[in-house]
Amino acid sequence: MTIPAVLTQRQAHKRTFALAWPMILSNITIPLLGLVDTAVIGHLDEAYYLGGVAVGSMIITFLMWMLGFLRMGTTALVAQGHGADDIQAQLRVLGQGLILALGLASALLVLQWPILHWGLPLAGGSDQVQLYASQYFQIRIWGAPAALINLVLLGFLLGRGQPKVAMWQLILGNSLNIGLDLLFVMGFGWGVPGAAWASLCAEYGTMALAAYLVWRVLVANRVERLPWSLNGLSRLVRLNRDIFLRTLCLQLCLSFVTIMGARLGDVVVAGNAVLMNFMLVMAYALDGFAYSAEVEVGRAWGRVDRRRFVDAVTLGWFWSGLTALGFAAAFAVGGDGLIRLLTDLPPVQAHAQTYLPWVVVLPMMAFSCFLFDGVYIGAAQGAQMRNAMLVSALGFFLLWWLTRDWGNHGLWLALNGFMALRGITLAWHYHRYLKPEALRPVRGS
């Protein structure tokens, strides 16, 4: 078997890591925040506190991740504009992204009560879990404007290939969140509302920092004002529509795990919440290589550079696989200790330890789909991402239905199968259809 030439080139590996490592480092602070939330709330005296945060956070996460297309679409089109050396195209995408973010945030605030009214019964759980989930949601939802603006600003910075700037935005913002979490929950004794208030304050602090970082970029490029133009908005909307549908399917599957866990009991949903933090740590680390692929593929697409396109995919897949193998080994060796660190409730510890083997194999099932998500975002091929996700989501629910008598084991089997299907469908499409000759010049943005 011939080793791809790019894997023997030290400079190519350095270029990949120059983009990936800042995002890996900063992304680790995102699940670290979740770990702190879980550890702080998990050491209160009842499992329903942790269950309430898990359900309330699930609803907020569902909404924010569904709208994650704001970051992805912005990164893709800004990277292509950057590759084509078109600063005006980049600025147009930034302005249009901010308009979309403010409109969507306003809609969330107006619709917050219907969302809560329908979301909590769907999520299930005991009366106590629903009470604390409601408290958490009603505070966190007011951070929506800042959260969505942050997605656009982060996408702009990443698309321009400035991961170190984005890194400081995420690290400082999430560090603020963690510090406030400890202060409000442990110091002031505010409990579940304290965790929500910490996240809310940190969202606006992060937005202020991101706005300053983007302002510096604009000053460096002698930009006096953004071109608030709707010209080319349809391209951004089409791409965002497809990414939205893809993310909706993803969130339905992930939320289904929490919902069914809540219906199996407070201990099950709390134990699954602990294990889902393992998955988030792995996912955000692998996303560093996906971000690298987004930027490199986007630049290659903008420059019509076929060789660089293939090299970006090859390097990303290689390093994603090695990273996933490392996480699998780490979870196998240190998983029990991390569970005990996150919660001292014996029933929750026992539950999480029982299902830990599913988390150990998850990185190897999932790494390919994270990498190819980055590839297809960078190429602005949202329709293919959408179609692959629809097939994978159908596979997820079919696997769960066939193994529903297995209880929580069936849920974790379906989740592993879902991740594997995502990688298989995108890899198949890439090798069959997304050939280097598919690259074409970026048309009017």
Image: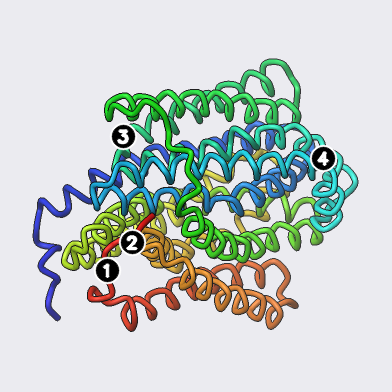
Gap between marks 4 and 3 measured at Cα: 37 Å
Q: Amino acid at mark 2?
A: Arg
Foreground: disc 2 or disc 3: 2
Gap between marks 2 and 3 measured at Cα: 29 Å
> What residue is shown at x 50% (from left), y 44% (from top)?
96
Q: Which residue is mark 2?
A: 443
User: Label 2 neighbourhood size at 10 Å, few (<14), some (14-19), many (20+)?
Assistant: few
Label 3 element class: helix
Looking at this view, name the residue that lies furthest to the right: 127
Gap between marks 2 and 4 measured at Cα: 46 Å
Image position of 201 (left or right of 47): left
Gap between marks 1 and 3 measured at Cα: 29 Å
The answer to whether marks 4 and 3 mark residues whose Cβ atoms lie closer than 8 Å is: no
- The numbered mark at residue 134 is 4
Q: Amino acid at mark 4?
A: Ser
Q: Is residue 341 visible?
A: no
The answer to whether marks 1 and 2 mark residues whose Cβ atoms lie closer than 8 Å is: no
> What residue is shown at x 50% (from left), y 50% (from top)?
335
Foreground: disc 2 or disc 4: 2
Q: Quadrant of the N terminus?
A: bottom left
